[in-house]
C-alpha cells in the first residue's frame, strides 16, 4: 500500500467557515498577532489571550468538515495516509482521518503553564483560575510565535516515508512547516492544490499543480490517484 503524506494549512478549513485570522493589514481579529499569539502577549494580558482563543474554540464547535476533509479521509481506503497539519482545528479527525500530526497545537486542548506535557481535552471556556492538578494556570495548547515546534522532528520523519506528497491549503511560505517538502525522497510525486499557487512547476521534479480550492482540488486529486 502506497504511503501518502498530506500537508494541510488554513486553506482547507476556510471552506468550512474557519477564519484564517490574519487580515490584509496583518491583524488577527483586530489584534496585532504578537498580542494574542506569543508568550510575551500572554504574559502582558493573559485574559485577552484566553478570550481570543475562547472565541476561536466557540467558532470551531459551530462548523463541520467540508468535502476536502472527507475526501482525504476516504483516501485511507486505498492508501496508507498520514496528515501533517498546520491547523489547530479538529476537522480532519471529525471527517474520519486517523493519523494526524498537529504541528501548531490543538484548539480543543489546554496545557499547564508549569508542565508542557500536562495536556487536557478542553472544549469549554478557558479563564484565569482554571488550574492543572499542580495548581499552575492552564493555557491554550497552541504553538505561539517564537516557541519551538515540538512535533517538527516527527513530521520530518513522516515526510521522509512518503511515496506521494500532497500539499493543500498552505502557501508553503511559513517556516518551519514549509521546509518539510525538502525532506521527500528524490523524484517523489508532489501534488500542490491551491487556487493561487505560489510555487512553480519548474521548482521541483515530478510536480503537479491543481489550481483550485481544496474541495474541488481534492476531487481532482482523487481522479489523478484513480481512487
Image: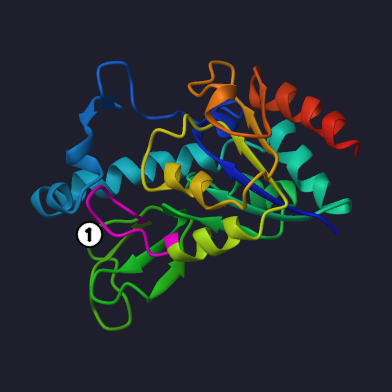
Residue at the spot x=65%, y=60% of the render? 161
Which sits in the foreground, 126 or 71?
A: 71
Residue 118 included in the magenta stretch of the image: no
Which sits in the foreground, 122 or 163?
A: 163
Residue at the spot x=64%, y=21% of the render? 213
Q: Hey, which residue is sitting farthest left in the picture?
A: 44
Q: Quadrant of the N terminus?
A: bottom right
Q: Quadrant of the C terminus?
A: top right
Rendering colour mode: rainbow
Residue 151 included in the magenta stretch of the image: yes
> Where does residue 76 sit, x and y in percent of width and height?
81, 53
Q: Which residues are magenta?
A: 142-152
Which sits in the foreground, 101 or 174?
A: 174
Residue at the spot x=15%, y=46% of the render? 41
Q: Is residue 73 above or below residue 19?
A: below
> Where does residue 211 sit, x and y in percent of width and height?
65, 17
Which sits in the foreground, 94 or 10?
A: 10
Find numbered disc 1 in the image and state the secondary structure of the residue it sits on: loop
Give the left or right position of residue 216, taking residue 135 as reference.
right
- Which secondary structure dominates the residues rendered in magenta? loop
Which residue is label 1 attached to? 128
Residue at the spot x=49%, y=44% of the render? 87
Q: Is residue 121 above or below residue 24?
A: below
Amino acid at each position: 500500500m502506497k504511503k501518502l503524506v498530506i500537508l494541510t494549512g488554513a486553506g482547507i478549513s476556510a471552506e468550512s467557515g474557519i477564519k484564517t485570522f490574519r487580515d490584509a493589514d496583518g491583524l488577527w481579529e483586530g489584534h496585532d498577532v504578537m498580542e494574542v499569539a506569543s508568550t510575551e502577549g500572554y504574559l502582558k494580558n493573559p485574559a485577552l489571550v484566553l478570550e481570543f482563543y475562547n472565541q476561536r474554540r466557540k467558532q470551531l464547535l459551530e462548523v463541520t468538515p467540508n468535502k476536502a476533509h472527507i475526501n482525504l479521509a476516504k483516501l485511507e481506503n486505498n492508501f496508507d495516509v498520514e496528515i501533517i497539519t498546520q491547523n489547530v482545528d479538529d476537522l480532519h479527525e471529525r471527517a474520519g482521518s486517523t493519523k494526524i500530526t498537529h504541528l501548531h497545537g490543538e484548539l480543543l486542548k489546554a496545557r499547564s503553564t508549569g508542565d508542557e506535557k500536562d495536556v487536557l481535552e478542553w472544549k469549554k471556556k478557558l479563564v484565569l483560575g482554571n488550574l492543572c492538578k499542580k495548581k499552575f494556570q492552564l493555557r491554550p495548547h497552541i504553538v505561539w510565535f517564537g516557541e519551538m515546534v515540538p512535533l517538527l522532528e516527527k513530521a520530518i520523519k513522516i515526510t521522509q516515508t512518503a511515496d506521494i506528497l500532497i500539499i493543500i491549503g498552505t502557501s508553503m511560505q511559513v517556516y518551519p512547516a514549509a521546509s518539510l517538502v525538502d525532506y521527500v525522497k528524490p523524484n517523489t510525486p508532489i501534488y500542490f492544490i491551491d487556487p493561487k499557487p505560489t510555487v512553480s512547476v519548474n521548482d521541483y521534479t515530478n510536480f503537479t499543480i491543481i489550481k483550485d480550492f481544496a474541495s474541488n482540488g481534492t476531487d481532482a486529486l482523487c481522479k489523478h490517484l484513480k481512487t
